[in-house]
Image (spheres, grey):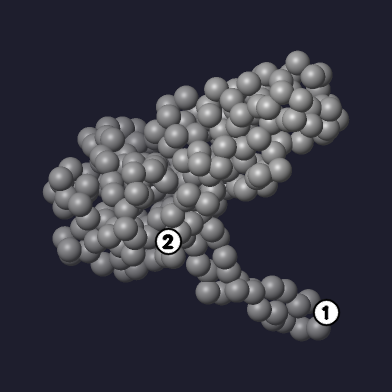
Amino acid sequence: MPRYHQIYVALRHQIVSGVYDRSGLPPELRLMEQYQVARVTVRRAIIELVREGMVYRRPGQGTFVKLDHPSRAESQPRIQGLLDNLIASAEQTSVRLIEYGVQPCPPDAAAGLSMAEGQHALRVVRLRSHQGKPVSLITTYLPTHLSPLLTPLDLEQQPMLSLLEKGGIRIGAAEQSVSSCPADAVVAPLLDEPVGSALLSVVRVVRDVDGYPVQWLHGLYRPHCYDYRMALTRAGEATTRVWLASDITTGLR
């Protein structure tokens, strides 16, 4: 990624997060020192922000944030609920089905579903939005015998786990990992984020009450749309006391 674009992504994130507000962006000289680049590089990054309509320039005064830009953090809705807990948030969000079909399962999804690599599985890709703004892109793989429980029309109207449970699948447990990844050229326009910007990445394997995997999920989330909070308690002996997490709550903001 070109250096100017890296700076543009960083400044854009800070604007969306509310770090830079009415006082505007730092002077170009300060940005040059902060990022260790030439003035032309800083100016090109700012030009990208101007083109996007996130900032405006006043000759001799500086660069200022457009507070009414739709990507501003304060314009983002807040919803309490589990991260991608579609059952809890379905009434407050909408879903657009991007992809639905049976195809060979990729290695990571196959491992999660205890299937052979290349074995066919149902692939579903959904874009979830709130108040017309995209918040997450969810890709799931499921064993093909579950396909009759998940019609394309139903998937745009009801949470996937609810449909599985209505079909007789008894959901028992799940394992989940959270990390980050950059938005590529396919995902970025769907989530209305710049190419290369950081996204929250969640991988989850859902199992039924007998321990059989019924869903492998990879969710990509706009990070400024979500909060991740947990309560911590101390446990253990005096010399080996550790923090234990409880009451984890995540949700849209």
Q: Position of residue 147 (x, y in %)?
A: 18, 46
Please state which amino acid type lies under the numbered disc 1.
Answer: Thr
Q: Would residue 48 appear left or right of 186 to someone viewing this image?
A: right
Q: Which residue is mark 2?
A: 79
- Give me the disc on residue 163: none
Look at 47% across and 40% down and name the residue there.
70
Please state which amino acid type lies under the numbered disc 2.
Answer: Ile
Front-lying residue, 131 or 37: 131
Q: Position of residue 107 (x, y in %)?
A: 43, 37
Number of other residues with Cα within 10 Å of mark 2, as a class: few under 14, some 14 to 19, many 20 or more: some
Look at 53% across and 27% down and name the residue there.
52
Q: Which residue is mark 1?
A: 239
Q: Quadrant of the N terminus?
A: top right
| Gap in angstroms between the C-alphas marked 1 and 2 | 40 Å
Q: Secondary structure at mark 1?
A: loop
Look at 83% across and 32% down and name the residue there.
30
The quarter holding residue 50 reads: top right
Q: Position of residue 209 (x, y in %)?
A: 32, 68
Q: Secondary structure at mark 2?
A: loop
As displayed, is residue 17 above or below residue 243? above
The quarter holding residue 245 reads: bottom right
Q: Would residue 181 appear left or right of 152 to someone viewing this image?
A: right
Residue 201 in view of the camera: no
As displayed, is residue 183 above or below residue 2? below
Front-lying residue, 76 or 207: 76
Front-lying residue, 186 or 222: 222
